[in-house]
Image: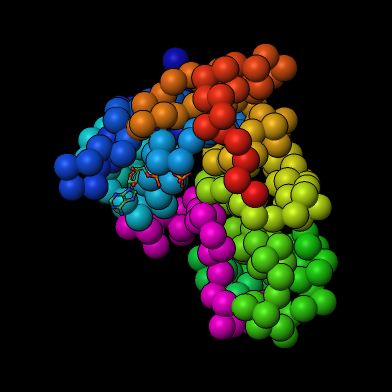
Amino acid sequence: MTTPFVAVDGLTIAYGDAVAVDGISFDLDQGECLAILGPNGAGKSSVAKAFAGLVKPAGGSLVVDGTDLADRRPDQIARSRIAYLPEGRGIFPGLTVAENVALGMRVLPSGERAAAEAQAYELFPVLGRRRKQTAATMSGGEQQMLAVARALMTKPKLLVADEVSLGLAPMVIDAIYEAWASVRSTGLTMIVIEQYVEKALDFADRALVLRRGRVLWTGAADGAADHIVHGYLGNDLAPQA
Ligand SMILES: Nc1ncnc2c1ncn2[C@@H]1O[C@H](COP(=O)(O)OP(=O)(O)OP(=O)(O)O)[C@@H](O)[C@H]1O
């Protein structure tokens, strides 16, 4: 039996006495994309933060490419090419686009940085035109593109993206998903947390519905999934944009 690329087994996350994620398990093969869906407070962001090393699991394991992330620091995880896009925008608003890109490159060996920088501007040409602009003065969509470019330029083996679509215009959401599609052919494995259910199911190979920290349903993100997911979560899943 081959070991899955991502193996989450009995993952439990608690904040004090409050259990946010209650023993969930799932696997992912290399190159697969999993959409994690669920209402507010379901535990989705907590799972994403565990992949980034920002919360320590109270139990279970979280193995990526043979390494259990439960004992690793966020900087060690970033260097092992696991990219995390936090909810909101993971950028430095007071710095320029070019400075943000330069900081993103620091996890890469120096020989790979020039190509990575070029790739960031190729993915989103608008960023190339705004290199000298302070990130805080850009639109929300441009800031999110900068965050996505920074994550993708490190050529991650796993990308964990937490609600990147939140509050963005449909055109910007499409641009971000197109950028992801263009790098997926390189074997990138993805975990996408979304409120925008149709978009996520359209893009992902598999879906997992969380509610109150437990897996309600998991299965292929095919034609049937939309119906099933809405059946499980009903109005709880209304997009918030
Ligand atoms: N730092 C924290 N301290 C205490 N409780 C927390 C903390 N972070 C999250 N929680 C709680 O854990 C539960 C799961 O939160 P989490 O943010 O993981 O859910 P979510 O599905 O991502 O929700 P949303 O869609 O609203 O972002 C919630 O009840 C939340 O209040």
Q: Is residue 75 magenta?
A: yes
Residue 94 at x, y percent in the picture: 56, 83
Q: Is residue 69 left or right of residue 58?
A: right
Q: Quadrant of residue 152?
A: bottom right
Residue 77 at x, y percent in the picture: 41, 54
* Residue under the image location 52 percent in, 25 percent down: 233
Q: How is the image coloured?
A: rainbow
* Residue under the image location 56 percent in, 24 percent down: 234
* Residue under the image location 70 percent in, 75 percent down: 138
Q: Quadrant of the N terminus?
A: top left
* 116 vs 182, nearest the viewer: 182
In the rendered view, tell whether residue 213 sits above or below residue 46.
above
Q: Is residue 89 left or right of residue 49?
A: right
* 218 vs 29, nearest the viewer: 218
- Is residue 81 visible to us here? no
Magenta part of the chain: 73-97
In the rendered view, tell whether residue 151 sits above or below residue 199.
below
Q: Is residue 57 left or right of residue 177?
A: left
Q: Is residue 198 magenta?
A: no
In the rendered view, tell whether residue 24 sits above or below residue 239.
above
Residue 27 at x, y percent in the picture: 46, 26
